[in-house]
Image (cartoon, helix red, strand yellow):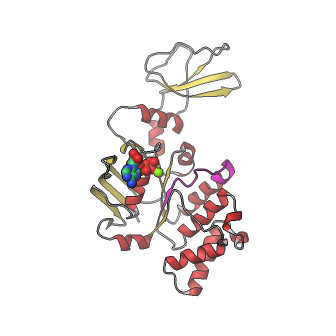
């Protein structure tokens, strides 16, 4: 299984250019799509799931064209939209059974087996008789994921699966993806950098529909090696004088006091210390750079 996006543009009827000459590809593992709201993540996923037509360019899923081979593609994928609606009155089992019927899983024995397997994977077996409306947000998200993997897709597309979850639930959902990525390709969108850090084997960063980075997270971090600095904040809290071109990426409370962190080509002041780059630094840096995609 692989996806291949070539020179993809999407212009909506209202002339919003949601995707602007995007190129990327993925074969295995988790491809993380990272970008702020409105950067084109959902548009890219909907096109890949054959729910939206590209304006120009091509997208292939397992070698199949999203314009011409929709049914063949749909048979291979699971898609979890950003705001998935579940029927509140159905139980967890009924929800999966209903979805399985929509997927044309008509053989009762096969359907039962698939449902049980999905429930096990998401650790939901003990909740089969609970009504969906009695579940927490995180558990509902797990039910939604269980239904997305019912057909045992070889590509799973999930749009912002961790949005709105509390930290504990978010970790659980992430570990499910890490586990599932051993058998299917996952494309996951998020605006949360820590999601990428946890699970993505490759990374596409979008901004205003343009690709700002495509490659591995490690390569992105390497490109910032030696350019991330920590500067101690003086006790009064006044900002130190820093060299021009210092891009602040965060404030950290350390045992030695508050540290200002940021990216700069050279030391921003005499007592600045080089720090190991993290994805938060890289993301802030990518978002502020001018035109021209950074493609590893
Ligand atoms: P993201 O998922 O990263 O938040 P979207 O793909 O939803 O981004 O949106 C990208 C851009 O396209 C935004 O400017 C959004 O307002 C616009 N957009 C999204 N869907 C539509 C639509 N159906 N019609 C017109 N514009 C849209
Ligand atoms: Mg979106």
Q: Does residue 87 lie above or below 212 as drawn?
A: below
User: Is residue 143 at all visible to an observer of this figure?
Assistant: yes
Q: Given the current orientation, which residue lies at the most extreme front position?
A: 14
Q: Which residues are magenta?
A: 155-170
Relative to residue 186, is residue 163 depicted above or below? above
What percent of the width, then of the height, locates residue 92?
66, 71
Q: What residue is at 59 percent from the left and 77 percent from the top?
A: 97
Q: Is residue 206 left or right of residue 92?
A: left
Residue 155 at x, y percent in the picture = 46, 65
Determine the residue positioned at 31% across, 57% down: 54
Please check the rendered image and state whether residue 157 is part of the magenta-colored stretch, yes or no: yes
34 to the left or right of 87: left
Which quadrant holds the C terminus?
A: top left
Name above or below for residue 211 compared with residue 233: below
Quadrant in the picture for the N terminus = bottom left
Horizontal and vertical percent position of residue 101? 53, 79
Left or right: residue 125 compared with residue 212: right
Residue 40 visible in image: no
């Amino acid at each position: 299984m692989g996806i291949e996006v070539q020179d993809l543009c999407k212009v909506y009827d209202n002339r919003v250019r949601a995707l602007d000459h995007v190129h990327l590809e993925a074969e295995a593992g988790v491809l993380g799509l990272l970008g702020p709201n409105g950067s084109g993540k959902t548009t890219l996923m909907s096109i890949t799931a054959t729910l939206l037509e590209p304006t120009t360019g091509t997208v292939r899923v397992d070698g199949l064209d999203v314009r011409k081979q929709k049914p063949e593609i749909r048979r291979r994928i699971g898609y979890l939209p950003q705001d998935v609606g579940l029927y509140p009155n159905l139980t967890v089992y009924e929800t999966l059974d209903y979805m399985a019927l929509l997927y044309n899983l008509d053989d009762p024995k096969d359907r039962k087996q698939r449902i049980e397997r999905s429930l096990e994977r998401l650790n939901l077996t003990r909740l089969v008789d609970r009504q969906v409306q009695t579940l927490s947000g995180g558990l509902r998200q797990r039910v939604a994921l269980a239904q997305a993997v019912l057909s045992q897709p070889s590509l799973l597309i999930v749009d912002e699966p961790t949005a709105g979850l509390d930290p504990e639930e978010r970790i659980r959902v992430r570990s499910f993806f890490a586990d599932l990525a051993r058998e299917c390709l996952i494309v996951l969108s998020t605006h949360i950098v820590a999601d990428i850090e946890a699970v993505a084997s490759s990374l596409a960063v979008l901004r205003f529909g343009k690709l700002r980075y495509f490659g591995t997270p490690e390569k992105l971090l390497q490109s910032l090696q030696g350019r991330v600095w920590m500067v101690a904040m003086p006790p009064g809290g006044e900002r130190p004088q820093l060299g021009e071109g210092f891009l602040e990426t965060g404030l950290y409370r350390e045992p030695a006091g508050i540290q200002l962190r940021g990216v700069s080509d050279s030391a921003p002041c005499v007592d600045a210390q080089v720090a190991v780059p993290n994805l938060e630094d890289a993301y802030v840096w990518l978002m502020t750079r001018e035109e021209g995609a950074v493609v590893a």
